[in-house]
Amino acid sequence: MNTTPTREASRHPYPPRLRTLSVISSEPLSPTMRRFVFAGGELEPEFPFVPLATGMHVKVVVPQEDTGRLEMPTLGEHGLIAPEGARLAIRDYSVRGFDAETRLLTIDFVLHDHGPAGRWAIGARNGSRLGILGPRGYTIYPNGFERYVLGADETALPALERWIEETPAGARIDAFVAGPAESRRPLPSHPKLSLHWIAGTGSTPLVDALTAAAPAGDGRTYLWAAGEAGIVAPLRRHLQGAGFARTEFDVSGYWRLGLAGSGEHAEERA
């Protein structure tokens, strides 16, 4: 880990790549989430898994539900191009882990039947194939704050776990996780972690907890939150009104209540 204190996030581009990978192992994390490990010859050893790039995500392409065939897009001048006649299901998912030596990629999936990627995860087994696109780049968050206030719902748990693992040991972490009781599970440890599980879904419980934990900017606290898109606007209003500098927070909406594919990333940022 880079031990040089930083006070601002930095953005790093990465050339877009398309890969077809296969599941080599999986494990249940809770009744509602499963961890998959992927391998494949197209997975490059220089894949950019770096400390505190906790929000880095890839685009997942699942097989066609009517045929079971994995139809991959191509990269065009203005973005992705689907094969003729194919309607691709593409969703954003956080990268939970990558081992450069073994070239194994780890991604956690919420299990649900109201989106194609969630349905794929319910039925996936060793050997199941998936398309992986990107990342197109990543943000490295600052490591020079004394305190980190972190908020997540179940869709953002993989990123939150990385925050806990990669935040410097001397910093204090106050982490808040909102969601149903069945989503609760053991999380990584940190010497100065205070973890709070919040009952309820949607944006309100998480927003209320975070605004209470960070009532005013003090120059020593960094706030990160991700989850249902309804958290973005109220948290942004609170943080800006409470004296947080724009370099002292990052808030992302990973999904939007009421939309198909709910629970799969569709990012909206503050």
Image (spheres, grey):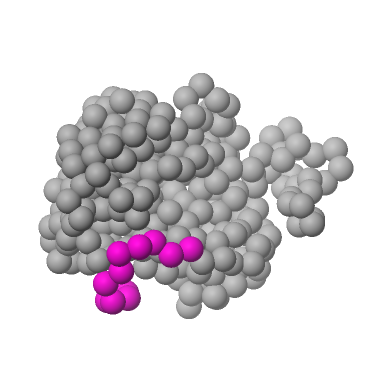
Q: Can residue 154 be seen in this view?
A: no
Task: Indicate the quadrant where residue 86 lies.
Answer: top right
**Image position of 134 (left or right of 221):** right
**Which residue lies most toward the top here?**
258
- Whether residue 243 can be seen here: yes
Where are the magenta residues, as a range? 1-11
User: Residue 8 colored magenta?
Assistant: yes
Q: In this view, does 266 lie to the left or right of 248?
A: right
Is 103 drawn above or below residue 16 in the view shown?
A: below
In the rendered image, the quadrant that contains the N terminus is bottom left
**Left or right: where 134 falls relative to 177:** right
Q: Which of 250 and 237 is in front in this view?
A: 237
Q: Position of residue 124 (x, y in %)?
A: 55, 44
Please say if 37 is above or below 269: below
**Pick the front one: 243 or 114:** 243
Residue 217 image offset from top left, x and y in percent: 21, 47
State the residue at coordinates (18%, 66%).
169
